[in-house]
Image: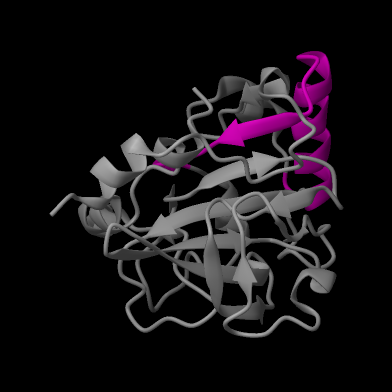
Amino acid sequence: MKSLVSILNTLPASRILDASIDISKYILLDLSSTNTELVASQPETSDDFEDFIFNYIKNNNAEVAYGGYIEGRNLYKRSTIFKNDSVPERNIHIGLDLWAKAGTPVLAALDGKVHSFKNNEGFGDYGPTIILEHEIENEIFYTLYGHLSLESIENLTVGTIFKKGSQVGTLGNSAVNGDYAPHVHFQIIKNLQDKWGDYPGVCNTNDLNFYIENCPDPNLLLKIT
């Protein structure tokens, strides 16, 4: 039986943002704690991060910035859901972020059906989130789309079928998406562990090996590079 990674490697590239945006307009973005330019700018609010990210996009003549898989970030220190007295700090990003303008269409990466959806409200959380279930070569797995608009989950029902490339929703703004610059957090998940409309997108260093195994690199499917 093929592994999920092997299956993803053999699939044609998927797009999860507005298909009219050519891949040549994508630019890699480093939001790690080692990015000296980011550290020097000291962004703290969602507006600060939005200015930093969209200036970067504009200066590179791009429309979409992407990156962040297994990236250690300082930006989560803003929120107590990632660091508090009762749990170890979580600061390693285990999905892929694609940053673009609010309202940009978000597309299904593969044929699938709605497993669950939820508005994960709270500072630093996902906001509106959709999880799709897929089955390829008898392998069941999931894709998660976080930080969407509220409209993306209005009138949505579990079991709704989406074809690859069809619109799932749109990017939300900071008022609804957990207080982030507009982007979609995209994650591939083998075992949802009974989660519903939610799944960790940031982990602690002690749990990293588990999440690398359970959440393979989304670029295996997106094939941006």
Locate residue 51: give its quadrant: top right
Residue drawn at x 35%, y 43% as measured from the top left: 8
Q: Which residue occupies the extreme top position in the image?
A: 60
By what rule are the colours in the image chosen?
one colour
Identify which residue, 51 or 4, lies in the foreground.
Answer: 4
Q: Is residue 81 visible?
A: no
Instruction: Name the quadrant containing residue 71.
Output: top left
Q: Is residue 38 magenta?
A: no
Tell whether 188 sits left or right of 130: left
Up the image or down, 118 lies above or below 107; here it is below
Residue in view at x 17 percent, y 50 percent: 2
Q: Indicate left or right for 3 with 183 as reference.
A: left
- Res 141 seen here: yes
Q: Which residues are drawn in magenta?
A: 44-72
Compared with 89, 114 (above or below) is below
The answer to whether residue 219 is left or right of residue 190 is right
Could you say where residue 94 lies in the image, as x and y percent from the top left?
42, 50
Q: Residue visible at 72% across and 81% down?
A: 156
Q: Percent position (x, y) of residue 139? A: 28, 62
Frontmost residue, 214 versus 75: 214
Residue 210: percent from the left, percent from the top? Answer: 22, 58
Residue sitting nearer the eye, 167 or 69: 167
- Name the foreground residue: 56 vs 105: 105
Q: Is residue 51 magenta?
A: yes
Q: What is the quadrant of the N terminus in the image?
A: bottom left
